[in-house]
Image (cartoon, rainbow, N blue to C red):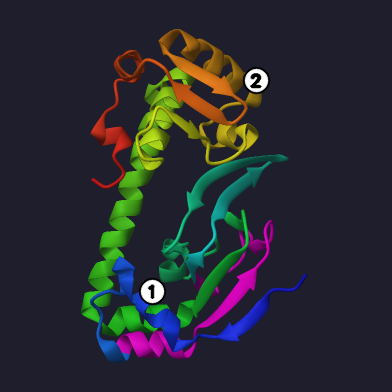
Amino acid sequence: MCPVRLTMPESDYPDIREVHLFAEMAEDSFEALMRGAYVQNFPPQIELITEGEPSDFLHVLLTGSVDLVSSWNGRETSMATVRPISTFILAATIRDAPYLMSARTLEKSRIALIPSQDVRAVFADDHVFARAIVTELAQCYRSVIKSQKDLKLRTSRERLANYLLRQQRRAGGAAGFDLEFEKRRLASVLGMTPENLSRAFKGLGAYGVAVDGTRITIEDQQDLERFAKSDPLIDDHTT
């Protein structure tokens, strides 16, 4: 099934304008970006960009979700999940450098593609847009540092415990909630093998975590929180 390419409809402009990157830039600068942009509808499991290839477009995810992955020596790992409405991969676009990650759709997704050369041209002329890009890249850098701290300072059980608490908050705070994706991919995101993830889930049973497939129930909230020792300098990606 081939993706459907469409010119950028003006009805999408308000959604894109809501993204922090584009919110305060000059109207003529925004229109310059939109003139060369277009929208494509992609089915699930379509590779959008390939690690190592030139960064021809800045992608804006309008609906759906995208998995950012990287591979080496026959191994592959999930780096992050992109959700609407947000951009990826900005750093490669600004530096005119190869992509450091690949990206594939996790579900049916609608994505705006803005030519990278247009983004760089407006970046050079629109100071408000340039500041927004610097802010976005700084936030991305801080997120990478937090992920590294999570990976290097915590055991597998501690990483899983904190992930479950973050997922619980995203799901509305109820004791029972579903994992956002299957366990093999979760293991990759948390830097574990599937076997290690299974052992980590079993270990968290002593702290009130019950597992039924992808359904999680936290039966002792306080005990799990005491074990996890959540830290906003690691777990709060808004700071």
Q: Residue at x 25, y 85 (%)?
A: 26
Badge number at residue 186 = none
- Which amino acid is tagged 1? Asp
- Measured as percent of width and height from the top left, residue 143 is found at 35, 45
Badge number at residue 195 = 2
Tell me if mark 1 has few (under 14), some (14-19) or many (20+) residues whose alpha carbon lies within 10 angstroms of its own: some
The vertical placement of 150 against 201, above or below, is below
Residue 49 part of the magenta-drawn span = yes
- Measured as percent of width and height from the top left, residue 110 is found at 56, 69
- Which amino acid is tagged 2? Glu
Q: Which residue is mark 1?
A: 15
Query: Which quadrant holds the N terminus?
Result: bottom right
The vertical placement of 180 against 56, above or below, is above
Q: Residue at x 34, y 85 (%)?
A: 30
Image-quadrant location for residue 109: bottom right
Q: Residue at x 27, y 75 (%)?
A: 129
**In the drawing, does residue 204 fall left or right of residue 21?**
right
Image-quadrant location for residue 153: top left
- Measured as percent of width and height from the top left, residue 199 is found at 58, 15
**In the drawing, does residue 150 fall left or right of residue 106?**
left
Tell me which segment is drawn in magenta.
29-58
Q: Of 69 and 197, which appears nearest the observer?
A: 197
- Measured as percent of width and height from the top left, residue 194 is found at 64, 26
Q: Secondary structure at mark 1?
A: helix
